[in-house]
Image (cartoon, rainbow, N blue to C red):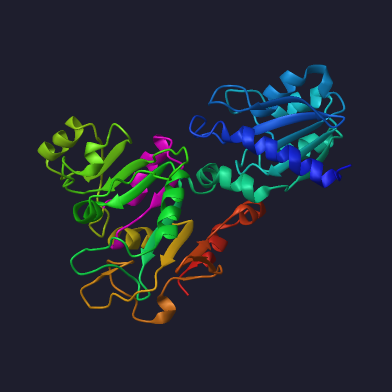
């Protein structure tokens, strides 16, 4: 006979599997799955398929019918209780069904809900538990959490550098700094993000595909985004020639030559034009708005150095994954992982993160991981002051 906790974990694992079925179709909504269990048996299941359609809880309850009476409902995100949307509140449906217990992974970060759904269920006499597999649930919907918290995609900054922090030699040679296991990680990250972003310098020096390639595994290609203020991306580059395999978006400035833009568009690329910021760089905040409008909720930034520096200085980073390889490139003319702008005059003015670094061995390399916020800080309601402390200047 299994324990109650083991049963809860079993059903919540099923919920998360159901929720993943909506990945790629539900944005900007979250991926949500739900199951109804009565006397230890599954009687209903469902997941949210796309915006405007029924929520997962409603689907599961409809399949369960009268068998839901006195049963348990498992769902990875707090049931909604607000009216400002196309579908009715899920809390009303749950209460009317006769469900006696609701098990939830994470609270809803939407300020229209954010704990109120739980309170409404509890006022109706329903037993509510929150927190089981919250880390997995956050990971699945980190883009939605970021949309609610920051009004932009969840951004992962990824890099591979030598011990002395260099990503390429003076000639631009960078293939490959890291080992096979680290390269596999890069493709695993691409497989779990809506889009990948690099600067045009990376295109000109490396001519990368920027697609996902994992042997023996079904994968998806992220939308490939190139920061290219003057539309210099060659139409014969691998990124352009493989548009039929993966979408390509060129982010150009308003002063980019119209002829270049038309050539890229004729080749099948989407061109997004943005203003330049005070530093003469493409305005990343404007770009974030464009990405949200296009339902990009998770973004992987792979550099190069000036792109990395721009995202860090703009504080547009939620997670860092830096691979350090056992080699030294050296030289004043090699390329740094973080480039652009002026260094601070005093060390106390440097960006120092208050979150710990987590090291992981990847063959002969070391992966350094920093999560600037996660499911714990999200549920506790991190304030703007706390955000500043995590991404602080000292």
Q: Is residue 211 visible?
A: yes
Say left or right for 160 vs 78: left
Which residue range is magenta in the image?
Answer: 282-305
Say left or right for 175 vs 362: left
Q: Is residue 271 magenta?
A: no
Q: Nearer the viewer, residue 163 or 289?
A: 163
Say left or right for 26 vs 66: left
Q: Nearer the viewer, residue 68 or 29?
A: 68
Say left or right for 56 vs 320: right
* Quarter of the figure with residue 124: top right
Point 48% across, 33% down: residue: 24
- In the picture, the quarter occupied by the N terminus is top right
List x then y, in percent, for residue 18: 63, 32
Q: Nearer the viewer, residue 178 or 48?
A: 178
List x then y, in percent, for residue 222: 39, 41
Point 12% across, 42% down: residue: 257
């Amino acid at each position: 006979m299994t324990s109650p906790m083991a049963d809860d974990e079993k059903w919540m694992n099923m919920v998360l599997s159901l929720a993943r079925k909506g990945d790629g179709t539900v944005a900007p909504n979250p991926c949500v799955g739900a199951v109804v269990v009565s006397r230890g048996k599954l009687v209903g299941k469902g997941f949210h398929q796309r915006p405007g359609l029924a929520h997962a809880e409603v689907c599961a309850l409809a399949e369960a019918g009268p068998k839901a009476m006195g049963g348990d409902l498992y769902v990875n995100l707090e049931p909604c209780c607000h009216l400002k949307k196309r579908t009715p509140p899920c809390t009303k449906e749950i209460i009317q069904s006769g469900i006696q217990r609701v098990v939830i992974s994470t609270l809803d970060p939407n300020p229209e809900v954010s704990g109120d759904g739980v309170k409404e269920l509890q006022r109706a006499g329903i037993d509510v538990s929150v927190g089981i597999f919250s880390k997995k649930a956050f990971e699945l919907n980190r883009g939605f959490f970021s949309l609610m918290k920051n009004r932009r995609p969840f951004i992962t900054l990824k890099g591979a550098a030598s011990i002395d922090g260099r990503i390429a030699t003076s000639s631009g040679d960078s293939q490959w700094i890291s080992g096979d296991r680290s390269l596999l990680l890069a493709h695993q990250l691409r497989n779990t993000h809506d889009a990948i972003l690099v600067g045009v310098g990376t295109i000109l020096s490396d001519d990368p595909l920027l697609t996902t390639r994992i042997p023996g595994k079904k994968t998806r290609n992220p939308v490939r985004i190139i920061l290219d203020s003057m539309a210099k991306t060659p139409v014969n580059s691998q990124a352009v020639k493989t548009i039929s395999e993966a979408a390509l978006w060129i982010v150009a400035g308003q002063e980019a030559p119209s002829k270049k833009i038309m050539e890229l568009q004729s080749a099948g690329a989407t061109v997004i034009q943005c203003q330049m910021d005070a530093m003469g760089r493409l305005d990343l905040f404007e770009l974030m708005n464009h990405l949200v409008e296009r339902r990009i909720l998770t973004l992987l930034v792979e550099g190069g150095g000036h792109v990395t520096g721009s995202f860090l200085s703009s504080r547009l980073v939620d997670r860092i994954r830096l691979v350090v390889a056992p080699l030294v490139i050296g030289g004043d003319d090699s390329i740094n992982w973080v480039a652009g702008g002026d260094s601070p005059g005093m060390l106390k003015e440097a960006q120092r993160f208050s979150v710990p670094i987590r090291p992981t061995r990847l063959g002969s390399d070391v992966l350094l991981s920093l999560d600037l916020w996660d499911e714990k800080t999200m549920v506790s309601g991190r304030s703007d002051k706390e955000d500043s402390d995590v991404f602080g200047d000292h």
